[in-house]
Each structure stands twice: as C-alpha cells, then as structure tokens.
Image (cartoon, rainbow, N blue to C red):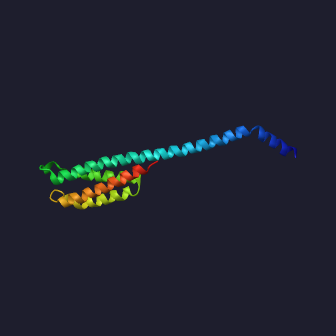
Amino acid sequence: MSISLSFKKTFKQNLLAIISLVIALTALSYNSWRNELSEENRNYRAAGFEILREAAHLQLVVDQATYSTNKEQVDPIQGWVRVNLILSLSKIIGEPVRGKASALKTVWQDKWPILYSSEEANKTVSQKISELNRAVENKIASLN
C-alpha cells in the first residue's frame, strides 16, 4: 500500500511536468506533420506552375506552326521537349493531372505533323492544353 501511495503522491507532485511533456510531444508531432504537408504542397505548387508555363510555351509552338507565315522557324522538337517535361512533372502532382498530360502527349504524337496545314489539329491540341491547365489549376486550388 505504501508503494501505491508514494506513487500517487509523486504523480501529483509531477503532474504539471507530465502534462507539459504530453503537450510538448503533441505539439512536436503536429508541427512535424504540418511541415511535411506544407513541403508536399510547395512541391505540388512548384510543379503545377512549371506545367502551366510549359503548356503556355507549347501553345505558342502550336499556334506558330499553324498560323505563322514563316513556318521554317517553327521547330516541332520544341513541342516534344515541352510535352515530355509536362508529362514528367505531372507525375509529381498525380491524378488527374497525370492523365491530362498523358492525353496531351497522345494527341501531340498524332497531330504535330499536320499542325502546319490543319487548323483542326491546332484546335485539338489546344483543347488538350486547356484541359491540362484546368486540372493543374484545380489541383493548386485544392491545396491546404
């Protein structure tokens, strides 16, 4: 009985320290979790903004290929570089951006050779770029 009483007495004497320790551990755990989430969100935002930038450059390549009077200056390799970078960055963000990037690459594969002569090909690629942009914007807007 004396052990039980001495434990209760010791516990009561150290109750403030125990409560402080529990609060400190809880705060540390929450802070670590929040820092990880913030870093993940920063990565999503950075990748998202880069995708939006590359999509804008790709749109420029698409429009120049279709509408430019000096088509010799339009390089479809620039389009491939942008499409592949978009696809790589979309893997960081995840679905549905990854799906939209993959669909863009598929359309680009089919349409880039005829962009010089087909306004319809331009519209098809442009629509996929717009869908990708909306998916990225929605992902960025949904972050905490």
User: In percent of the image, x 22 and y 58: which residue is there?
Assistant: 123
Lateral position of residue 48 relative to residue 13, left or right: left
142 vs 98, nearest the viewer: 142
User: In percent of the image, x 32 and y 50: which residue is there?
Assistant: 85
Q: Position of residue 109 (x, y in %)?
A: 25, 60
User: In percent of the image, x 36 and y 59: which residue is there?
Assistant: 99
Lateral position of residue 76 relative to residue 139, left or right: left
Q: Position of residue 91 (x, y in %)?
A: 39, 54
Most extreme residue toward the right is: 1
User: In percent of the image, x 27 and y 60: which residue is there?
Assistant: 107
140 vs 54, nearest the viewer: 140
21 vs 77, nearest the viewer: 21
Tag count: 0
Q: Position of residue 103 (x, y in %)?
A: 31, 60
Most extreme residue toward the left is: 69
Q: Position of residue 15 (x, y in %)?
A: 74, 40
Lateral position of residue 55 relative to residue 95, left or right: left
